[in-house]
Image (spheres, helix red, strand yellow):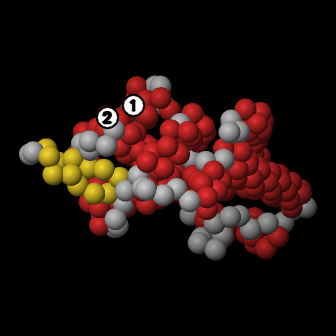
Amino acid sequence: MRNETLARRHELFVATATLASHASAQGHGFRQRDIRFFAELFSNWAHPDTNSELVIQNVQIQRYLLYLSKEGFLKSLNKGNRPLFKLTRIGLLELLTRLVESKREREPAEFLFLVYFVSGYREWLIRLIKDEGAQFPPSMQIELGALLDTNTLVQRELSRISKQITKLKMRIEDATRTSTLVAEQIRKGEQFDQIVREVEKKIPYELNSRRPLSELISSIQPDQRLWELRDGNRMRAKIIWEPAVKLLDQYRRLLSGLRTETNP
């Protein structure tokens, strides 16, 4: 898929921009530049800092539209010399499904934008899909209602955050254990190479399968090796991972309060 990089990096803003462009055109067809404008606008809402402004090239949007067209999610309208586009009903559902059910981890600002978009424009999105066909069967109404349930969306994010916190706490515990083990072995007069082997056996680090701890340590300057195992582990836990847990916990509490407020 030629637009894979675009979809992977900017799908949240490109897909919502495509939906917004379709709605704003009111059946007359939207242009490529409409998507670019809305994508940049939505990115600006999620990232008010102008240094984070999203910049998308026209060729990227062309590839995205070509992919949607090939999959039957988009159709072209012949109106003069300007290329105009319109999403099909299945295209509207596909973009919404991708947005809501994406497995890609999003930073808090972008996830909150998604909650805003789904919650704020829920009735508008339902009307768009209803108007794109002669029939709107109950089964589709139920499917769409479940898709646009922000409580479910937030609950999935809460579950992901809880897993992240659990992993970080395990890493903090391993770092502390490693630091303590090294200090104890040093006091006992054990040779450093033996200490490394002991740590590698009892408390393997996360990338040990890619580069064993003994190999990693041997690649470090000799006067830095002990510091990395004993002091470095303790400092990484204190300065990086413990604050990360606190930030994630704050985010979790924020979302827990948001869950009921955004329920349709």
Whether residue 146 is situated above or below residue 198 in the rendered picture: above
The residue positioned 66% from the left and 44% from the top of the image is 150
Type of residue at label 2? Answer: Phe
Residue 75 in view in this figure? yes
The residue positioned 40% from the left and 25% from the top of the image is 50
Are there few (<14), some (14-19), or many (20+) residues within 10 Å of tag 2? some
Type of residue at label 1? Answer: Leu
Closest to the observer, 260 or 191:
260
| Pointers 2 and 1 in contact (C-beta within 8 Å) | yes
Closest to the observer, 118 or 165:
118
**On the image, numbered disc 2 is attached to which residue?**
37
Residue 35 in view in this figure? no
Residue 106, percent from left and from top: 56, 47
**On the image, numbered disc 1 is attached to which residue?**
41
Q: Secondary structure at mark 2?
A: helix
Q: Tell me the tag on residue 260.
A: none
